[in-house]
Amino acid sequence: MHWTVAASFIHDLNLTTSTWLTPFVKNHQHHFTIIPRCVPLASWHTRKSSVTDLKEWMDHWFQASDALHRTHGGVITVFPQLAAAVAMQKHLLRKDAPVVAWMYNVGTCSSGVRRLLAQKSSQAIDRFVVHTQRERQIYSDWLELPIERFEFVPYQVPEIPVTYEENTAQPFIAALGSAHRDFPALFEAVKTLNIPTIVAASKRSLEGISVPSQVQTPFDIGKQDCLRLAQEARISVVPMVPNEQITAAGQVTIVEAMRMGRALIATRCNGAEDYIIDGETGLLVEPHSVKDLTDAIQKLWEDHELRNRLGQNAMRYAAEHFSNEAAGAALDRILTEVANQVGERSVAASTETSSVMSLRLAQP
């Protein structure tokens, strides 16, 4: 089956180098056309608002329209705004094209009119791919759709070259990322232990929080600088606040740390438990527990053998489960299942039409 692929991070300027997961789909039944945005999407860390504005919605709408009109089969979207835009246009055009919504993470499930619009448009989506187990039930309830339409596939990243060594002369903790982070708990822990810490997060996520002297907060640093910090740090920590109103958080930072073989601590919430096997590929700590976090940091900070074992286990586990190859195999399977379901619907519709025609011809 032919599929068009609409991803928000693929635009006209990087189209020649961006193939997403399509090279890792080995089934020759599927072939793809990448549909780019006309302009790059604004960076999450530099944008002033977390809400998609009208200009961004228009860009999503045009990219979705191009994907829907150019497909000879179905559409794959990456990020929920594109999924919504494709689904709405599919409904308006009465086009029978299957839609697979990859990385369907809306952040917070809204209510009122926005929920009604989401429920209406989501009817046209054949499969939703989410990156935590909890999201399956959350979205099933929110959109009032069968849970079978929602499939958990772990978030994936390609192999990350480890080009920096751990800074043993001036060891430190790295805490990267912004969404739903429990920085107050982390700051209490590192202040108690008096351990140097570097937090690379957005200014918005640290507003109103007192930063102790042990913590540095470099703002507006790029992706490569963040990866360097993670590789040079003795420990990576992803402290999070549990929140029933949000869908998932922390997966990007967790998977990147594991792919680089870093010793990792994360809070047991927001889907982190789908990625870390406690005591084998990292350490999980209980939410809202400064003591638990402090004890875990001290334990990992002082035990070189434990850090090495957890880091190596994490790297092997991530290569098997969180790689492009693993995600490509999952995408291959999902597309095949959806294509088969489309074929079954076509056969059923054809059979029904033939039956109706036979009845009409049999009538006197």
Image (tube, rainbow, N blue to C red):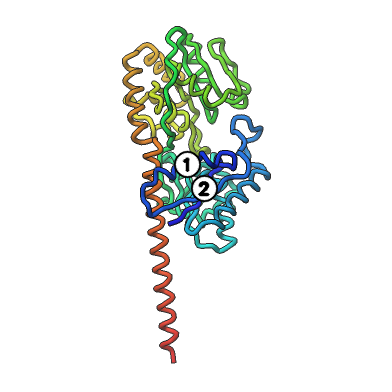
Nearest the camera: 272 or 289?
272
Q: Mark 1 belongs to which amino acid?
A: Trp
In percent of the image, x 60 and y 33: which residue is there? 43
Nearest the camera: 317 or 7?
7
In percent of the image, x 43 and y 30: which residue is there? 255
Kindly indicate whether the residue at mark 1 contacts the one at mark 2 (C-beta within 8 angstroms): yes
Instruction: Decide: is 72 above or below 215.
Output: below
Residue at the outermost top position? 169
Nearest the camera: 301 or 134?
301
The residue where tag 2 is placed is 34
Say whether residue 108 is visible: no
Left or right: 219, with 195 as reference point: right
Residue at the outermost front position? 16
Mark 1 element type: loop
Mark 2 element type: strand
Q: Mark 2 belongs to which amino acid?
A: Ile
| Residue 293: % across, % down | 43, 19
The residue where tag 1 is placed is 20
Q: CA distance from mark 2 to mark 1?
A: 9 Å
| Residue 142: % across, % down | 51, 48
